[in-house]
Image (tube, rainbow, N blue to C red):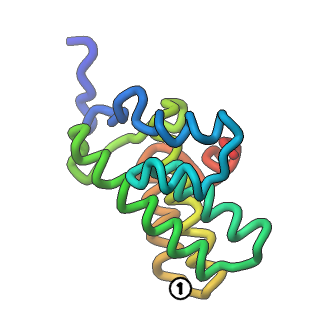
Amino acid sequence: MTGANLLGPEPTRLPEGADADARAVLTAGGDPRDAARRAPASSLAWALLAERALRDEGDPVAAYAYARTGYHRGLDALRRAGWRGQGPIPADHEPNQGFLRALLALAEAAEAIEEDEEAARCAQFLADSGTSAAEVAGLR
């Protein structure tokens, strides 16, 4: 038998164009806030806002809120794509990257506000998804 993953669920890949509206705003030189307004369901827009809040603004509380929004929007999209709460979410599949970046930003923001259980849970979620913090950070 070929093609079947006998060890677990098949990888979940969000549909092509999942963040197309947000990417269009960003490609045209728009700000991540503009992308979030235009495409509020885009994990990528919220992940970018969270990353900026952590990196440039030194505001881990805002980063946490942005990242949590992107994380939940991504969970909704993953479920619509057939994800059942476990299995690989490949980082090399571009539509998955917004969710994974939001998840990493949530881990980082949780760590910054000393919500250690949440930070550990997010790090484990990345590992369970078949990726790592370092791999997702490389997408930035």
27, 44: nearer the viewer: 27
86, 14: nearer the viewer: 14
Pointer 1 residue: 115
Check disc 1 and give the amino acid type. Glu
Q: How many marks?
A: 1
Question: Residue at the spot x=41%, y=52% of the render?
Answer: 128
The image shows residue 35, relative to residue 125, as above or below, that is: above
In this view of the protein, can residue 99 be seen by the observer? no
Say few, some or many: other residues with alpha carbon within 10 Å of mark 1 (under 14 / 14 to 19 / 20 or more).
Answer: few
Where does the image place residue 114, in percent across and percent down from the top left? 60, 87
Where does the image place residue 74, in percent across and percent down from the top left? 38, 52
The image shows residue 2, relative to residue 133, as above or below, that is: above
The image shows residue 68, relative to residue 40, as above or below, that is: below
Question: Residue at the spot x=66%, y=42% of the render?
Answer: 139
Q: Secondary structure at mark 1?
A: loop
Question: Residue at the spot x=46%, y=43% of the render?
Answer: 130
